[in-house]
Image (spheres, rainbow, N blue to C red):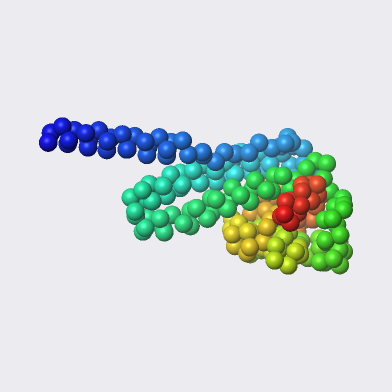
């Protein structure tokens, strides 16, 4: 009997160790590197904003997302549904912040600006009438975001058309609207206040000069598959 108890204890200890190893091996989210220097988008977005935005704000979303996911895994293991529900807002906020910013950095380029080419341009003309009309509509929707949030150009899979939408806070576009994100403009104040103060329209106007249309086009191609 004592031998059987000992075996059970050893099995339990082994199982606990395995669970801990699996949890420890879970791949954590990391802050993506930028493909350009913090000052590369000047004069449209200055280096101080980019440095703080990327290395502080985005990094905070990543760190908090990892912590929240660990807590959520613990709640799942315990079958604690109340804790799981309580953690949902933090998952949405920090997960959305990580998703949105990861897209945002690639949407920008020191060699950006101008107009898109090829299939993306044709889709813009079809769905908005012209590139200028799309810019005006997206700029208006982005500037009009109350408080903090994002303006988006997204792809609607069902209709095969481009759509413009705005999301509050860090709500991710696809999780909130079903649209696949192609181009996002961050209008949290940390994205522009040090340079543009409270004049959000000037920031939105300036950011078009560094939009990476090649990246947006690539996202459209992937979204259509």
Give the camera-side residue of 135 and 155. Answer: 155
Give the camera-side residue of 67 and 44. Answer: 67
* Residue 224 locus on image (x, y percent): 74, 56
Residue at the image point whose x is 46% and y is 57% from the top:
88
Residue at the image point whose x is 72% and y is 51% from the top:
222
Can you see residue 124? yes
Residue at the image point whose x is 83% and y is 41% from the top:
111
Q: In terms of image quadrants, where is residue 176?
A: bottom right
How many labels sit on residues? 0
Horizontal arrangement in the rendering, residue 208 relative to residue 98 (left or right): right
Placement of the N terminus among the 4 image quadrants: top left
Residue at the image point whose x is 59% and y is 59% from the top:
175
Instruction: Please say if 122 is above or below 8.
Output: below
Instruction: Please say if 18 is above or below 142.
Output: above
* Residue 8 locus on image (x, y percent): 22, 37
Q: In terms of image quadrants, where is residue 12?
A: top left
Instruction: Please say if 108 is above or below 13.
Output: below
């Amino acid at each position: 009997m004592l031998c059987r108890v000992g075996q059970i204890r050893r099995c339990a200890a082994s199982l606990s160790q395995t669970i801990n190893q699996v949890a420890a091996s879970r791949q954590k989210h990391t802050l993506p590197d930028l493909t350009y220097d913090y000052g590369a988008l000047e004069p449209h977005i200055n280096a101080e904003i980019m440095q703080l935005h990327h290395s502080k704000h985005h990094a905070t979303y990543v760190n908090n997302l990892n912590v929240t996911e660990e807590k959520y895994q613990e709640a799942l293991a315990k079958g604690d549904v109340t804790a799981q529900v309580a953690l949902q807002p933090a998952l949405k906020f920090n997960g959305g912040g990580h998703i949105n910013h990861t897209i945002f950095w690639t949407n920008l380029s020191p060699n950006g600006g101008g107009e898109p080419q090829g299939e993306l341009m044709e889709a813009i003309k079809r769905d908005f009438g012209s590139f200028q009309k799309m810019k005006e509509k997206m700029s208006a929707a982005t500037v009009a975001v109350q408080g903090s949030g994002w303006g988006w150009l997204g792809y609607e899979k069902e209709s095969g058309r481009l759509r413009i939408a705005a999301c509050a806070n860090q709500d991710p576009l696809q999780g909130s609207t079903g649209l696949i994100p192609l181009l996002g403009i961050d209008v949290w104040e940390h994205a522009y206040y040090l340079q543009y103060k409270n004049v959000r329209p000037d920031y939105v106007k300036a950011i078009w000069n560094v939009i990476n249309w090649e990246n947006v086009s690539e996202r459209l191609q992937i979204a259509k598959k």
